[in-house]
């Protein structure tokens, strides 16, 4: 990779790293958080909603397949800006679809476009960051990377949901969500145009030196090497099962919060969910992630893994409590959700470190990490897709008990799956 000595290349990373990762987060949370709340407000049945939203998340599970071919574009900047603007178009189409007769079909199609654009943008975004900065700079700005991705979480799951709840009461459900998705589309257009100016221009050497055939051949070699790793099939099962409980509970939990009390839910409004889950819950998630990272660093992955799995799954008891006690005190509900999100953040460190330190070790470390995270994403898609049908069959209270039971297989498997990278063969 060669960076051209343009004004953009010399620009301080603080002028483009925040906008780059804010643009990474907004469409992701639009699909995975905001869309669900919109569909709840539009009275879409649980099983239909979760089935389609689960399928939309497949884009992030499969993105590693087409990621190498993005190197054929002239530059990483062009790919980043292009898919920011495609994401903006998709969000605008969602807003337009809400006032049409077949809104659900059209909204899902538009959200599929946003999903594909967002997943593809993730690849180019991280590639641009790595190619534009030295190792020292990558470490220096990593905190800003995560911070602005979480700013997108705050804006989406917090501020926009609070705004949507307020607008629902004044201009109605369709009007409120039209405003929200139009706002997101405009925000992505502004970010895309700003990044067109601010991002460094990094040429792709593969665009000149390689071909699609060469890249396809390399991809096949990478996949074959991944599948040849000792114990890889057990590792794949472990990765998928790691999020079996959390994937289902995180999907149904927000629906339970909004569902009417006569239907077994807590009957919260959209803005209350924004305050409890998007604001207090996001703070708890970030805190849990930081503490979990230090905890795993202190004990080491092998000794910490059992505790990380427990931390991720035991807070499901918070939803069991809420579904049994059915409290009306909002502060109590928010506290229970914050506990659940703290545990989610704390335990999620486990699967990330497992992918980094065990699964991806070897010649193709970055590519194997991408495949491993893709497997994790496919597992999440599976559990999200079926969660609605399971909830309808069991009811909310029994569903959360089922969710807790889904943690048992990964707890058992953690006692048998190697939690340390296999030793490298001795060199002759």
Image (cartoon, helix red, strand yellow):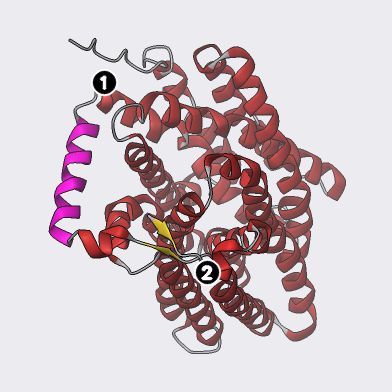
Q: Is residue 223 left or right of residue 279?
A: left
Give the SS element for disc 2: loop
Q: Position of residue 386 (x, y in %)?
A: 40, 49
| Residue 329 appears in the picture as rendered | no
Q: CA distance from mark 1 to mark 2?
A: 48 Å
Instruction: Tell me which corner region of the image, top left, top right, bottom left or bottom right, holds residue 109.
Output: bottom left
Give the SS element for disc 1: loop
Main SS, magenta residues = helix
Instruction: Tell me which corner region of the image, top left, top right, bottom left or bottom right, holds residue 214.
Output: bottom left
Question: Does the magenta-highlighted stretch encompass residue 107?
Answer: no
Q: Name the residue beneath numbered marker 1.
A: 231
Say which of marks 1 and 2 sits in front: 2
Q: Position of residue 270 (x, y in %)?
A: 72, 65
Instruction: Tell me which corner region of the image, top left, top right, bottom left or bottom right, holds residue 299.
Output: top right
Most distant residue in the front direction = 5
Q: Is residue 85 left or right of residue 254?
A: left
Q: Position of residue 27 (x, y in %)?
A: 54, 66
Image quadrant for the N terminus?
bottom left
Boundaries of the magenta span: 212-227
Instruction: Tell me, for residue 6, which label it has, or none.
Output: 2
Residue at x-position 48% and y-position 31%: 351
Residue at x-position 32% and y-position 68%: 73
Marks 1 & 2, CB-CB < 8 Å contact: no
């Amino acid at each position: 990779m060669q960076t051209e000595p343009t004004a953009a290349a010399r620009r301080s990373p603080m002028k483009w790293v925040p906008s780059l990762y804010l643009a990474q987060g907004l469409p992701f949370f639009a699909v995975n958080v905001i869309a669900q709340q919109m569909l709840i407000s539009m009275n879409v049945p649980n099983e239909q909603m979760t089935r389609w939203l689960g399928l939309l998340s497949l884009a992030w599970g499969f993105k590693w397949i087409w990621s190498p071919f993005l190197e054929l574009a002239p530059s990483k900047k062009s790919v980043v800006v292009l898919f920011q603007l495609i994401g903006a178009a998709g969000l605008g189409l969602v807003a337009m679809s809400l006032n049409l007769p077949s809104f659900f079909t059209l909204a899902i199609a538009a959200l599929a476009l946003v999903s594909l654009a967002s997943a593809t943008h993730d690849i180019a975004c991280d590639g641009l960051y790595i190619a534009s900065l030295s190792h020292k700079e990558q470490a220096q700005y990593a905190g800003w990377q995560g911070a602005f991705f979480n700013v997108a979480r705050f804006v989406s799951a917090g501020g926009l949901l609070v705004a949507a709840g307020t607008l629902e009461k004044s201009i109605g459900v369709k009007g409120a969500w039209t405003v929200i998705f139009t706002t997101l589309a405009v925000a992505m257009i502004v970010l895309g145009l700003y990044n067109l100016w601010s991002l460094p221009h990094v040429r792709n050497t593969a665009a000149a030196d390689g071909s699609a055939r060469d890249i396809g051949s390399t991809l096949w070699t990478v996949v074959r090497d991944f599948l040849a790793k000792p114990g890889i099939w057990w590792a794949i099962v472990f990765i998928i099962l790691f999020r079996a409980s959390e994937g289902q509970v995180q999907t149904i939990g927000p629906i339970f919060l909004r569902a009417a009390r006569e239907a077994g839910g807590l009957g919260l409004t959209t803005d209350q969910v924004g305050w409890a889950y998007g604001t207090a819950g996001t703070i708890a998630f970030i805190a849990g992630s930081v503490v979990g990272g230090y905890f795993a660093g202190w004990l080491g992955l092998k000794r910490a893994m059992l505790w990380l799995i427990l931390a991720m799954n035991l807070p499901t008891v918070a939803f069991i409590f809420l579904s049994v006690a059915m409290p009306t005190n909002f502060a109590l509900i928010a506290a229970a959700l914050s506990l659940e999100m703290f545990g989610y953040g704390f335990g999620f460190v486990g699967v990330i470190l497992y992918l980094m330190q065990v699964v991806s070790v070897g010649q193709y470390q970055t590519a194997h990490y991408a495949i491993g995270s893709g497997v994790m994403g496919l597992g999440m898609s599976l559990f999200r897709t079926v969660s609605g049908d399971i909830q309808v069959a069991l009811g909310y209270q029994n569903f959360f008990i089922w969710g807790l039971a889904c943690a048992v297989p990964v707890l058992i498997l953690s006692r048998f799956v190697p939690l340390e990278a296999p030793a490298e063969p001795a060199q002759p």
